[in-house]
C-alpha cells in the first residue's frame, strides 16, 4: 500500500492542464511509489475515464463547509478553495499528502521529496511567495507624505473577510504564502487549524482566495509549525520568469546558481494579449537560456 499521495483538482475546463500535471509526475521513475488522487469538480464522464487509467482514485469534491449559493453561481471548481483543507476525509488511506494545483507541473523530483520530508512531525510544508529578483513585495497607495493605504494581498483579503483589524495587521506585511503546493501529514493538527480559519474567512469574504488567507492565518497568527521550502518548489512564473538550461532540458531559476525548478506554477496565467497560456496551449513567449540565448517556448509541460 502506498503511504504518500499527490492530490489535485480540476473541472472540465482545466482537464488538459490536470492531465499534463499527471503526466509530468509519472515521467519520473520514483512516482511509482506515490499514489495520485484526483478531486472532481466538474469533469466529464469521458475525462474521468481517461484519468481513471492513470491515477489511483477519483472522488467528487464537495462543499465541506457550507457556502451560500449566491457565492457559488455555478462555479463548482470553487470547491477547490474548500475541499483541499479536508484531504484526509476524501482519501483516508494515506499518511502524507502533497497538494499540487492543476495549473502546475513537476520539473524536478527533488521538490516532491522535499515536500514529503517537510511535513514530518505534523509540520506544514509550503513556500512563501518571494525569491531573489522580486521587485514588489507589497503594494501601497500613497495619499500624501508618509500616509498610505496598504494593498498587500494578505491585508486586502483579510479586510474583505472581516477577520478583525488586529489579525489583518499581523498579516499585512507577512510574506505571502501560496497554497498551490503544500504538504501535511494525515494526523497533523494543521488540518483542524486551517479548517477553523477557513470557516471564518468564508463567512464574509469571497470564496476564491479564502483558503489561502486561512493558511496564512494558520501560519502567522496561530503559529502552525511550518517548514518553509525554497521558491523553486512552487515557482510562480507570472511573478518571475525562469531561464532554460538547454543541455539539461530543464527550466531553472533565473539567477545563479540556477537551481532546477521543481514545480512550475502557471497561477494567474501567462498572457499574450487576451489569450492565457493555460487555455491556449499554442502560446509561446521569449525565454532566456543560461547560455545567454533567447528561445520561443511554452511553459506548459511537454511543449
Image (cartoon, rainbow, N blue to C red):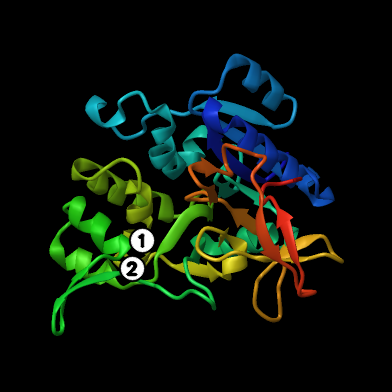
Query: Label 1, label 2: how many angstroms apart (C-alpha)?
Result: 6 Å
Q: Quadrant of the N terminus?
A: top right
Which quarter of the image is occupied by the C terminus?
top right
Residue placed at 72% from the left, 56% from the top? Answer: 296
Q: Position of residue 61 (x, y in %)?
A: 46, 29
From the viewer's perspective, tell me whether residue 17 is left or right of residue 192. right
Based on the displayed image, in which of its 4 quarters is residue 67 positioned?
Answer: top left
The disc placed on residue 131 is: none
Residue at x 47%, y 67% (from the top left corner): 128
**Residue pictured at 42% horizontal, 55% vertical:** 190
Mark 2, secondary structure of its residue: helix
- The circle drawn on residue 216 is 1
Is 139 or 78 nearer to us in this picture?
Answer: 139
Left or right of 59 on screen, residue 50: right
- Residue displayed at 61% across by 63% down: 233
Marks 1/2 in contact by CB < 8 Å: the verdict is yes
Q: Which residue is mark 2?
A: 220
Left or right, 133 with reference to 70: right
Q: Position of residue 121 (x, y in %)?
A: 54, 63
- In the image, residue 277 lies at what x, y percent? 59, 44
Name above or below for residue 95 compared with residue 68. below
Q: Which corner quadrant of the image does residue 216 belong to? A: bottom left
Task: Tell me the crowding category of disc 1: few under 14, some 14 to 19, or many 20 or more residues within 10 angstroms, Cα based.
Answer: many
Q: Is residue 234 positioned above or below 78 on the image?
A: below
Secondary structure beneath disc 1? helix
Residue at the front extreme of this rendering: 273
User: Residue 255: x, y in percent?
Assistant: 65, 78
Amino acid at each position: 500500500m502506498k503511504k504518500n499521495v499527490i492530490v489535485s483538482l480540476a473541472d472540465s475546463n482545466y482537464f488538459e492542464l490536470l492531465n499534463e500535471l499527471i503526466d509530468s509526475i509519472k515521467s519520473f521513475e520514483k512516482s511509482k511509489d506515490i499514489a495520485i488522487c484526483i478531486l472532481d469538480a466538474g469533469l466529464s464522464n469521458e475525462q474521468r475515464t481517461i484519468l481513471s487509467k492513470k491515477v489511483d482514485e477519483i472522488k467528487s469534491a464537495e462543499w465541506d463547509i457550507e457556502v451560500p449559493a449566491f457565492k457559488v453561481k455555478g462555479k463548482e471548481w470553487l470547491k477547490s478553495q474548500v475541499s483541499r483543507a479536508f484531504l484526509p476525509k476524501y482519501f483516508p488511506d494515506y499518511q502524507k499528502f502533497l497538494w499540487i494545483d492543476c495549473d502546475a507541473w513537476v520539473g524536478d523530483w527533488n521538490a516532491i521529496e522535499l515536500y514529503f520530508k517537510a511535513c514530518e512531525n505534523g509540520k506544514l510544508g509550503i513556500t512563501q511567495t518571494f525569491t531573489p529578483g522580486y521587485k514588489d513585495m507589497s503594494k501601497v497607495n500613497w495619499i500624501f507624505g508618509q500616509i498610505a493605504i496598504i494593498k498587500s494581498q494578505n491585508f486586502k483579503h483579510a479586510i474583505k473577510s472581516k477577520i478583525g483589524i488586529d489579525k489583518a495587521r499581523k498579516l499585512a506585511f507577512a510574506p505571502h504564502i501560496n497554497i498551490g503546493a503544500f504538504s501535511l501529514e494525515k494526523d497533523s493538527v494543521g488540518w483542524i487549524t486551517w479548517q477553523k480559519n477557513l470557516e471564518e474567512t468564508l463567512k464574509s469574504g469571497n470564496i476564491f482566495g479564502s483558503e489561502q488567507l486561512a493558511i496564512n492565518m494558520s501560519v502567522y497568527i496561530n503559529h502552525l509549525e511550518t517548514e518553509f521550502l525554497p521558491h523553486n518548489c512552487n515557482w510562480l512564473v507570472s511573478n518571475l520568469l525562469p531561464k532554460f538550461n538547454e543541455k539539461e532540458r530543464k527550466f531553472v531559476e533565473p539567477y545563479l546558481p540556477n537551481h532546477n525548478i521543481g514545480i512550475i506554477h502557471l497561477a494567474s496565467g501567462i498572457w499574450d494579449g487576451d489569450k492565457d497560456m493555460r487555455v491556449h496551449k499554442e502560446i509561446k513567449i521569449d525565454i532566456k537560456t543560461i547560455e545567454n540565448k533567447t528561445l520561443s517556448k511554452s511553459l506548459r509541460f511537454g511543449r
